[in-house]
Amino acid sequence: MESMAHRRRCFEIACRKAGLKLTPQRLGIYRELLTARDHPTAEALHRRLRTTLPTLSLDTVYRTLATLTHHGLISRLETKESLARFEAVVEPHHHLICCQCGKIMDFQWPAMEEISLPDEIRTWGRVDQKSVVLHGICQACLSESI
């Protein structure tokens, strides 16, 4: 697994290549996403960063997330509730989402990458990424309902 420092350096290089300035806001948002394991929303990121970046506006958070997503520097995950959640992990992986508590867990499924697409999808055009999102109830929520 890559170190946080290495990932930050790669992020900085990718920003420069994309012609993006390395603003304190962009760096702060990316650093928070690197350490977050809960796939935070824009609002959650804003709340977390207000202590270190007190002048940071929610609009800036939204615009920064859109820019970083557009350039492939972060990933966006849509939930059933139409809430956009974000993460710094851009490598292929999949998600489990608990329908009760909203917890999101990443998982790897290498066999998924090997599965051939159905013919009707192959004739559609080019598929750049396969991503599976599974919805259910996590073990913690199942235990609470007993």
Image: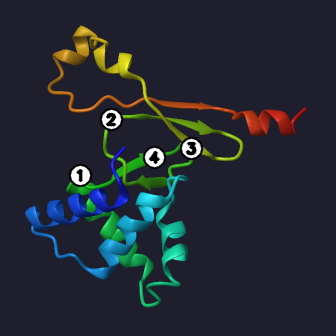
How packed mark 2 is, by other alpha carbons closer than 10 Å (few <14, some 14-19, many 20 or more), is few
> Where is mark 4, residue-wise?
78
> Where is mark 1, residue-wise?
72
Comes first in the chain, label 4 or label 1: 1
Q: Residue at x 15, y 27 (%)?
A: 126
Identify the amino acid type marked 1.
Answer: Gly
> Where is mark 2, residue-wise?
92
Q: Nearer the viewer, mark 4 or mark 3?
A: 3
| Mark pair 4, 3: CA separation | 11 Å
Q: Residue at x 77, y 39 (%)?
A: 141
Residue 17 point in image, percent of width and height: 9, 62
How packed mark 3 is, by other alpha carbons closer than 10 Å (few <14, some 14-19, many 20 or more), is many
The quadrant of the image that shows the N terminus is top left
> Where is mark 3, residue-wise?
104
Query: Are the two marked residues, 4 and 3, in contact with CB atoms closer than 8 angstroms?
Result: no
Quarter of the image where one finds residue 118? top left
Identify the amino acid type marked 3.
Answer: Ile
Badge 3 element: strand
Query: Are the two marked residues, 4 and 1, in contact with CB atoms closer than 8 angstroms?
Result: no
Comes first in the chain, label 3 or label 1: 1
